[in-house]
Image: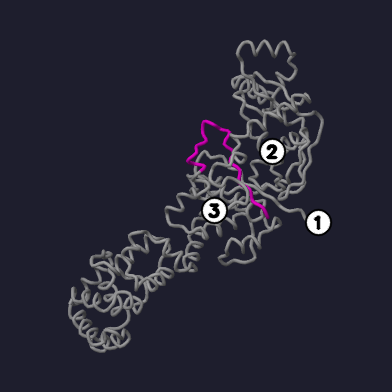
Amino acid sequence: MTQHRKTRFAPSPTGYIHLGNARTALFNRLFGQTFLLRIEDTDQERSRPEYTTALMEDLRWLKMDWDEGPASGQADQYFQSRRQAVYDRYYRQLEAQGRVYPCFCSPDDLVRSRKLQRLEGKPPRYAGTCAHLKPDEIQARLDQGLEPTLRFRVPAGRTIEFDDLVRGKQRFDTDTIGDFIIRRADGTPAFFFCNAVDDALMEVTHVLRGEDHLTNTPRQLLILEALGLRPPRYGHISLIVGEDGAPLSKRNGSRSIRELRRQGYLPLAVINLLARLGHRYTVESLQTLEQLQAGFSIDHLSRSPARFDPHQLDYWQQQAVHQADDETLWQWLNADSRSTIPPEKRAAFLALVRSNCVFPDQAAEWATILFRDEFPLTGQAREILAQTDSTFFRTALEAFQAHRNQWKSFLQTLQAQSGVKGKRLFKPLRAALTGRLDGPELPRLHELLGAEKILTRLSKWA
């Protein structure tokens, strides 16, 4: 029987979700049959409630709703900061088994130890300084007011093997790992511990995460083995790099989902880009989330770094705008544009948007041009208008008055009476009617502007 796949996204709310984290969430959403959201907020200094709220808003904006997790931000079991009693119970179990010990080494002690190991040509790992303290030695340190961390005692001479969903067979020698911290000095759980315990307790079956977590996996498998808990299957996906080949960061193009929202990107554009960063699809056209899920396969994940190209994001944005329905586009426009557009012109304007705009501010420019009395002129339009004799516009005005409802007849008459055709005919008309030389076809402008506005604008230059 095929195992039901339960995946999860477990972010730390220490900032706005960015492209890398959003892709991790998306891959888990596409791969899983049940998708869980868990908030890993044990870093009390950096975690902020407003980031948790923003995170959930951004996931919902991307249409990546979760099947299990916080609904209103108040579901305690999905916030690690509210699960301390659970972790304490498993700490006591490990203590009873002799699998952990208190460590009183200070951060400075650890830095000096690692430095010495490097000088001796050894890989830096915990030297086991506190691994064999006697009970009276531990008590003496506690009596001095020292607050220990809790370290997991890594068994010597073992090989940890697991089959990575993306990278295949993996082997780690425990003698190279070193005892690691599972509880901080302030009593809060370290990532290695609470992340693994919660995956097991929440019955997560599969985890896709960045390849930078690969070396965490043997540690977490050791923890779950000691606790008698079932681990998920892990898959470590390639990292995203910028156009310069360096890991994606603000410096080379990374943006938060919140920033993309403010810039006017549509969620469908973002998920179509992210779904293809390190994953191959046989269908190259814009797809819905459901279609992306149907085409997602672990076998199509690449082990090579995924290169982020901002031009590709704009390409998917253009496709998303072109295919959006009227209501989606209407809500996508800014409030000022919506208040400017006459109700009877709404459908025609949205048709213009689909073929001529990529972002809401571009649509706002066209709303101003078409429906306000004052609109800006580009430098090229001013130049064309300055070069065109007013006789042309007087002829155009007369021809339009005669054929105000038949654009084709108007153009034929203007061409015959002015002796002008081609660009010399269309450029002055565009400049006078819209203040620019690019944009929709002239018949569509005729429909949107209406006869009275066209007469007014031609009169200005006649």
Mark seen at residue 308: 3
Q: Amino acid at mark 2?
A: Ala
The CA span between labels 1 and 3 is 38 Å
Q: Amino acid at mark 1?
A: Met
Specify the quadrant that holds the C terminus. bottom left
Asked which secondary structure carries label 3, the reply is loop
Query: Which of disc 2 and disc 3 is earlier in sequence?
Result: 2
Question: Magenta segment, which residues?
Answer: 32-52
Q: Amino acid at mark 3?
A: Phe
Q: How many other residues sit within 10 Å of disc 3, few (<14), some (14-19) or many (≥20)?
A: many
The CA span between labels 3 and 2 is 30 Å
The answer to whether residue 168 is left or right of residue 259 is right
Query: Which of disc 1 and disc 2 is earlier in sequence?
Result: 1
x and y percent of residue 265 in the render? 46, 57
Q: Residue at x 34, y 73 (%)?
A: 344
Question: Where 368 falls versus 8 (above or below)?
Answer: below
Q: Would you name the residue on which mark 2 appears?
A: 196
x and y percent of residue 342 in the render? 32, 70
Observer-nearest residue: 449 or 420?
A: 449
Question: Where 335 falls versus 56 (above or below)?
Answer: below
Query: Disc 2 vs disc 1: which is toward the camera?
Result: 1
x and y percent of residue 331 in the render? 42, 61
Observer-nearest residue: 230 or 301?
A: 230
Mark seen at residue 1: 1
Q: Is residue 35 magenta?
A: yes
Asked which secondary structure carries label 1, the reply is loop
Q: How many other residues sit within 10 Å of disc 2, few (<14), some (14-19) or many (≥20)?
A: many
Asked which secondary structure carries label 2, the reply is helix
Query: Which of disc 3 and disc 1 is earlier in sequence?
Result: 1
